[in-house]
Every structure is written in C-alpha cells, then in structure tokens.
Image (cartoon, helix red, strand yellow):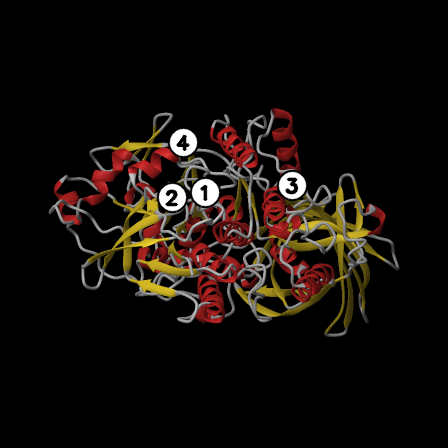
Amino acid sequence: MIEVAVIGAGTAGLVAARHLINAGLRPTIFEAAKTIGGAWTPSSSSAFSQRSTKDDNNKNNPSNDHPARKMWFGMHTNLSKHTCRFSDWPWAENASTFPSVEEMHEYLQSYSDCYLDASNCSFQFECEVTNVEQLDVPVDCLSRKSYQSCYNVEWLDLKTHIREKKDFGGVVVATGFFNTPRLPSFLENYSKTNEQQRSDLGGNNPEIIHSSQYISCESMRNKNVAVIGSSFSALEIAADLSQTVSRIVNVVPSVPWVMPRWIPKLESLQTTESTLRADSSVEDATMTILPVDLAFYRRTEPFPQKEVVQLDAESCRRRHAVLRSIAGIKQQLSPLGEPTNWSEPPFVVISDEYLDLTREGRIEVVHGRLMGLNQDGSLRISNSQTIENIDIVICCTGYTPHLHKFLSPRILEKLDYDPDDTFSPLSLAWDVLHPSLPGLAFCGMYRGPYMGIMDLQARLAAGVMSGGLSIDEDTLQTALDTTQLIRKASPRAQFPRFDYTGYMDSLAQLCFGGKYPTRNFGDMVAPSFYQPDEEISNRCSLELKHEIHHGQDGTRMPTFILQAILGNWTYDRHIVHMQTQKVERVSGTVKYTKYSRTSPQSRNEDINITTGDIPLLAAHSFHEHPVMYREDGLFELTPTQKFEVFREYEYISKHDALEIYFVEGGKRAHLFLSLKFVPDTEHSNEGYWVRATSDHLCIKDLYSADFRVKLDGLSASEIVIKYRVVGPSKDYESTTVLKPL
C-alpha cells in the first residue's frame, strides 16, 4: 500500500486523508499541534507545544504559533453551515446557522473520529515538517506505474526535539494559505520590543499586535485601540472591541462593500426545486431572508458552468451595481462610504454591525494607510493625518504562506514560488497539481473558507495519486496557463479563484467526469450536491427548502427590520379625530439607535457596573440588543397653537414578533405592541414593502396598528405607521410617515 504524507491536520488535511483512504492509500498526517482542527482550533485551546527558540545552528528562530489558537472568542463563520461543510458529512440538526469556532472544531473532530483511525492512517502530532525533497527515481507517480518512493520528508518531534525522516510515495501539502502573520515592514522590529523598552522611548508608545493575536475584547477593556485594515477580521474585530474599549479607530486603506450574514432576496413562494430559480417571476416572489452565501452563490448556467477567471471593467461595474442594490443607502450614509472606482473588482466583507456602529459614532473611520509611528507614539497616516493617544494597534494585514520553510528549493523553483505574493504565490493546475512534481499535491491552498473546494481538491489529489484518475498533459498545461493568467491579472480580484460555482464545477468535471452534481436545489450551490450519495443530496435539498421556508415565514423579519431602520429620520404625523374630522399635525425628527451608551435598559444585569457602559452582544446575536426610538417634534393643535413634544420607545425582536415597549424614566416599562409580520410583500422597481400588524388593548382603548417599511436592499427608505384607536373617550386615526435624513 502506498503511504502518503499529509502535512497539516486542519480542514484541508483531514479531508485529504479521508479521500486518500477511499482511494486505497494510507496517509500519515503530520501536525505541529497536539490536536486536529488547524485554523478552527478554539482560542482557549492549549493545543500547541512550546517550540524551541533555537535551531541546530544556534540562530534565533522565534516561535511562530499556528494562527489557529488565535481565533478570537465569540467569532462565528461568515458563511453558513450549508457552505462550511464537507460534501458527505452533514451538520447536526441543532447546529448554529453560522457556526462558532467551537462548533467548527467539534464538526471537524466528529469527521475525524468517523473516518480516520489507526487502522487506516497514522497521526504524528507535535511533529513539525522541516523539509520535503523530491527523490531522483525513475517513477511516474501520476500514473502510479511504480510503488517506489517519490519524496523524502524530514520532521522535528516537538516533544523530544529529535529529527526524523522517511520516504513516502506521495505528499499532500495541507497547511493552507493563512499561515504566517504579516506585519508592515516598519512595524516588525517595533512589535518585538517589550513594554519597558517602548516606555523608555518616551511618549505614549502603543503595543503592536497582529490580528492573529487578538483573543477577546475583555483583554482590552478601557483601552484606546486602532485597528488597521479593511478585511473581514478588521471590521469584525473593530465591532467586537466596541463593547469594551474607550475608543476604537479603524484605519481603512480601501473601501469594501459590507454585507451582513443575512441578506434579503426575492424568491418564489413555491420552494420546490423546479421553481426556486433565478428566473422566477417577480409576481410569484416574496422577500426571503437567507444566509449570505445562499443568496450570493447561485448557478447562472447549467452544469458545468464555465469558470470566470478575469473581470473586465464592465463586469466589475455590473458587480458593483448588484452590491449597491443590496446595500441600499446604509453604507452610503456611513462614515465608511461606498467604493468609488467601479471599474475595478469589488471587495466584499461580511459584518453584521460594523456600518451601524460607525454611524452611531462607536467606531471612528479614518481613510488612509498606516505609514509609521511618530516619536510620541502617534500613528502617521497617509494624507498628512495623525492619530494620537492609542494604546494598542491591531494589524489586520493578512498572512503569507510559509512553504519555503519546508519545501526544498528545487520544488519551489518548479512551482514558480514567490513568498512575497500574498495573492497567488505559486503556479498549480487547479491549485492542486503540477506536471513536474508527480506525487505532490496541494489541498486548501486557496484563499477562502470554502470546504466544498477543499473536498473536491482532495478527491482530485487522491484520484491522481492512486491512479484512479488520469489527466493528459495538454489539460494540465491549459490549467497551468490559467493560473499564470490569474497571477498576472491587474487589477486583481479579491480572491484568485473568485468564481465559486465555476471553480466547483471545474473540479467536479475532473473528479467525476461530469457525472455530478446529478441533483441540485434550484440554482443554489452546496457541497453536498458534489458527491455520489443520493441520500445525502436529498437531505441537503430538504435543509435548503427549510431554510427558504424560514426565510419567508416572517420569523427572521423582526431582526432584519431592526437593523434596516437604524439611523436618523424626519417624520410627519397626521391625527384625524373620526367624529369631528379635526386634524392635528406633529412633525420633527426620529432617531433609531442601537449602540448608544445612554440607551435605557430595564435589566440591570446588562449594565457594566464598573464603567456604566451597556455591553454589546457578539455579532451573531445582534438581534437580542434593543433598538431605541427617540422622537422630538412640534405638535400643531391649530396654526397658532404649537408646543414641543418628545416620545421614547424600545424595540426588541422576540421570536417572530417585533415588540414595542413604553420607556418611562429612562427605563423599559410595559408592552405597547407586539407586531407580527405577514408573509405577503409589495414590490416595485423602487423597492419593496413589508408589513406587520397588531391589535392591542391598552387599558380600555383598542389599538389596531399597521407598521409598513419600504426596503431598498438592506436599508429602509420609508416607514409608515398607522394606528386606529377606539375606546370610551378615543376615536382617532394616526398616520406617521418617516423618511431618512
């Protein structure tokens, strides 16, 4: 039996080992940590050994812990469990839609426990691979004409500090793309100085850390923090920190489109496979709130969809326009603003709260690049900007691959490896194979969390190594030429292989010869459709159908509406007394706020006694935080009789209802209305209306409420609130129209 070395026991390493076993090979899995999990190892884990600080030549070799144990507390995936999964391993029914780091690690552990054991593979934990060399033997490892060894692997046992080596019939590199934290060059030496050394420099010299070192907002309570970058980690860390820090500044070198985890999308009311398609009639559709990946990743062509690897200016503009239609005016009205150059590829970041936190002043946005630190410790930003009094700087500046740490120079030369290219550092066919390196494959060398891609890459690698798949030289060369095209692209897209569906289909054609996916659910793309087990495909279809149903039944609407209405509004209210037809008018401004430090709370346990601040919840549970309504206006009884008025309410999402409470003395009082959203939706080219109703007996008066919100993508563009009030001494109708400032 051919033995294959697998380097890494994270997501890519586990799925590679599983498919190597299926192909009749025996994997030996090398992992520097004590456990499996890789990038999804929880931050509280003690999975990593203390590494030696000196190598055999007594040169400094600073510890470079795997970024996995640096995942911050409370972090959740930015794609749903329908995408963050292997094709043949379903999630537990009670799993979160957007799993936590802990849930992801448990998922990987259960996958490993099921498929990998001592009978079919070997684990070498706390063993760091230090060298891989291609052996000079006359063997065609691509066709498996010989069982001779192809590669020599050397490793260091981190427990015993003993170096070992062994020949293997193949090697799968599964260390992933996000490995070595990258800091701006002018900060690298500064970040290594200790606190006393920085103090000796004088001034307020901040601590410099990489985002991989961020653990939780509690560790930085009451500090002034600057977050550098505009990536997912930058925006989510800034939002997380806003719970506890005194000041948070986000320095953004570029402007991405910011999308939440839940996206509204018009879908057919009939959630069958035949009708759930992009070309469904608008008249038959209703607004459906879906996980962002299910809303975005749709098939535009029948299988196989040709992969797009380059974007021209017109394609970029179309993509920006689509993202703008989803964002509505929310991002435009925020300090972040919108991307301005629509001729270049758009970048997208997933964050539920970031934009609203900037709009309410909890996060300061500074446009520019960090250029250096001044002697007084202030941050020097491009365009002659300076940021003072910062205690901690968190650099969300990405990672570099570390293949040069263990692949031999000869292998790296064949791969055309460039360690300074953080976009696409090496040339591979489909990011998996190279014709000059038979028996060597890569899995997970892909900038994205898409487990379906890794699954197909693992199937491809295992099939080729076992001889089950044969790929001709022309096909390999064409794939390599495509990679070269991607590497030379200018301007570059957010990811090298940005066409998820096209890339999945390309890999599936190689692995299955076009046989799969034999089944899908409308135009949705999910990993479970890319495998041969029909029962798993059927289960996936059922899960997606349930997801659509819950997106249409109104249960997600209260949470979504609370985010959509945040901001400042003008209002105009007309009160008509039904018996006399007398009309009274109130006009003024309304503020819907969610993160204000002065927001009233009825529950004392939600207030931090030390600081008096109201802590926010983690991004995944933002819907549990109340939204405050503050109305200031002028009541016009007659053209000559006017007086100032104000009113406060507290809005909360509770199950499937939007509950509105009176606020008295700065605290939540009794319930006023419990609004239930109805599934029907009015829509036009200018947006669509959603509606909620409620009948409520307030003492002796019956309030019949009609709450309508016009949505433009993620943003509310108009609100109409009607009350019909009937009681012993009341008989009037109130209509309030709100429009954004």
- Residue 265 location, x and y as percent? 70, 49
For the residue pair 570 and 613, the one nearer the viewer reads as 613
Q: Nearer the viewer, mark 2 or mark 3?
A: 2
Quadrant of the rendered image containing residue 234? top left
Which residue in the structure is indicated by mark 3?
328
Sequence-earlier tag: 2 or 1: 1
Q: Image quadrant for the C terminus?
A: top right
Which residue does the numbered mark 2 point to in the structure image? 396
- CA gap between label 4 and label 2 equals 14 Å
Residue type at the position of mark 4: Gly
Q: Is residue 188 above or below residue 619?
A: above
Label 4 sits on residue: 368
Q: Kindly tell me whether residue 339 is visible in this rendering.
A: yes
**Labels 2 and 1 touching (C-beta < 8 A):** yes
First reached walking from the N terminus: tag 4 or tag 2: 4
Q: Are marks 4 and 1 in contact (CB under 8 Å)?
A: no
Determine whether label 2 and label 3 are within 8 Å by CB. Answer: no
Q: Amino acid at mark 2?
A: Cys
Q: Secondary structure at mark 1?
A: loop
- What is the C-alpha distance between the residues marked 2 and 3? 27 Å
Q: Is residue 122 left or right of residue 106?
A: left
Residue under the point 50% across and 30% down = 492
Q: Which residue is mark 1?
A: 231
- Identify the residue at image location x=63%, y=39%: 323
Give the percent coordinates (x, y) of residue 474.
56, 33
Residue mark closest to the camera, 1 vs 3 = 1
